[in-house]
Amino acid sequence: RFCGARGEVDYRTDPLAACPSSWSTRRGARRVLAAHGGMAAAVSEVMKEIDVTMAKRGDVGMLENEQLVLFTGEDLVGLADTIGHLPLPRSLAVRAWTV
């Protein structure tokens, strides 16, 4: 939802709105992801995968541990349970998607 909300700001559209599934709990989200073949496959259903080097501000990235992050330009930002937004180096992204 974090990535979808940011996409709405940068692209004036929520790319995750095209997802045919919904959830309201972490358990439900895990079920949805499993049904879609995992995080990367689910994101690929609603966004276009691009080379990480082509990603720009507002694009969605993925870390090695399958956590989704947002490209902020030269860096990434993710979410951390204890501190909120977590700035990260762009070099940690292993996959990227755009609207």
Image (cartoon, grey):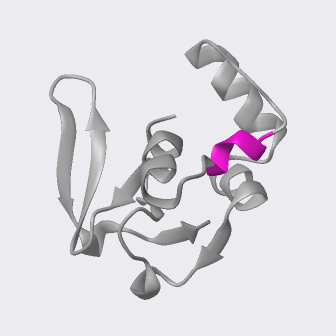
Residue 27 part of the magenta segment: no
Q: Quadrant of the C terminus?
A: bottom right
Position in image of residue 19 (x %, y %)? 77, 41
**35, above or below 65, in the image:** above
Position in image of residue 8 (x %, y %)? 51, 48
> Position of 27 compared to 81: left or right?
right
Q: Residue at x 37, y 56 (%)?
A: 70
Displayed quadrant of residue 88:
bottom left
Q: Report the span colored magenta.
A: 15-19
Q: Nearer the viewer, residue 25 or 57?
A: 57
> Position of 14 compared to 37: left or right?
left
Q: How many marks?
A: 0
Of helix, strand and loop, which mostly describes the magenta segment? helix
Q: Residue at x 19, y 44 (%)?
A: 86
Q: Residue at x 27, y 63 (%)?
A: 72
Q: Residue at x 73, y 55 (%)?
A: 46
Position in image of residue 71 (x %, y %)? 34, 64
